Amino acid sequence: SKFSRGIGIAGLQDARIDVTLKNITIVNSADSGRCVSTREGVSSLTMEGVNLQTSGSGNTQAFTVGGSNETINIRNSNLSTGTAGYAVITFNPVQMIIDNSKLSGYAALYMKGPSGSLGSSGSVVRVQNGSELSSKNPHPAESQSDFGTVVFETDNIQLQVVDSKIITEATDGSNQEAIGFFTNYETGNPVEGNQVTISGSSKVENIGANTIFADSTQAGTGKNNSIQISGGSFNFPISPEYCAPGFEIQQNADGSIVIVPDGSTTPPAQNN
């Protein structure tokens, strides 16, 4: 498709609808194009075995949450975008489960602040069952294109990563964060009240000298936002302040870092 706005799904304010997309592929090659967008009047959307791909230039969007207070389930699906695109972007509060699915782009998950919409504050997102969030930043430093795999641009969002992967890559001079706590779009202040948990056999991998797990001034003990890790492996050093209570850092013989229960002698199985 070269219709830039892609497919829009909408119901009525007094007759909200439940929608399922199953076993379909949508490719949009338009610049700044979208594949699927929700609007008002959508109660729930389930995507099962869906392949959404944008290949045009600009800030493309594979899946756009435009409606308010929706329940979204993404299962066994693949959402991908180009070098400046977002696999999932949310403009309103959402309850979302990403299950055994892959999201990739300039950002895999972009939680927007208010901008002609309510913004994503109050959202709860769970990433589970071998899902993968990945991003790649190919932009030079002078382009001022620092970004992240998961980007928070508003407050009070919960992100749960369980038995899944976060892969972050930077190939030029711009920085790319695995978990990016950015400026609140509405107030201009740093975001606050966001809570990220990583658990089970999750795996977090940074590739490239300009990758960062998270800005230590914005997340951690006594900071504006919380990261708590109670399991998983990392290919870079982790600050102890990110360990959930009762968990500690352990280094394997191959140099990888794992988070294990206090006093543990056997690292948990990992999600390869």
Image (cartoon, grey):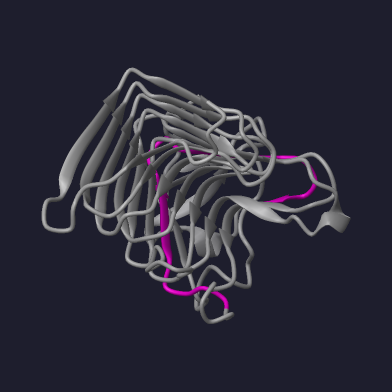
Q: For this view, does 48 lie left or right of residue 178?
A: left
x, y percent for residue 199: 39, 45
Q: For this view, does 39 lie left or right of residue 205?
A: left
x, y percent for residue 197: 40, 54
Front-most of 78 and 30? 30
* Residue lying furthest left: 15
Quarter location, residue 82: top right
**Residue pictured at 28% horizontal, 43% vertical:** 72
Above-or-below relation of 143 to 250:
below
Above-or-below relation of 138 to 49:
below
Magenta span has 202? Answer: yes
Does residue 262 show up?
Answer: no
Quarter location, residue 93: bottom left
Above-or-below relation of 231 to 253:
below
Quarter location, residue 195: bottom left
* Residue lying furthest top: 23
**Residue pictured at 26% horizontal, 34% vertical:** 46
x, y percent for residue 159: 39, 54
- First to last magenta residue range: 190-212
Does residue 162 show up?
Answer: yes
Q: For this view, does 164 lie left or right of residue 144?
A: left
* Residue lying furthest right: 142
**Residue pictured at 52% horizontal, 73% vertical:** 191
x, y percent for residue 120: 39, 63
Above-or-below relation of 124 to 231:
below
Q: For this view, does 95 lie left or right of residue 174?
A: left
Magenta span has 187? Answer: no
Give the tally of numbered discs: 0
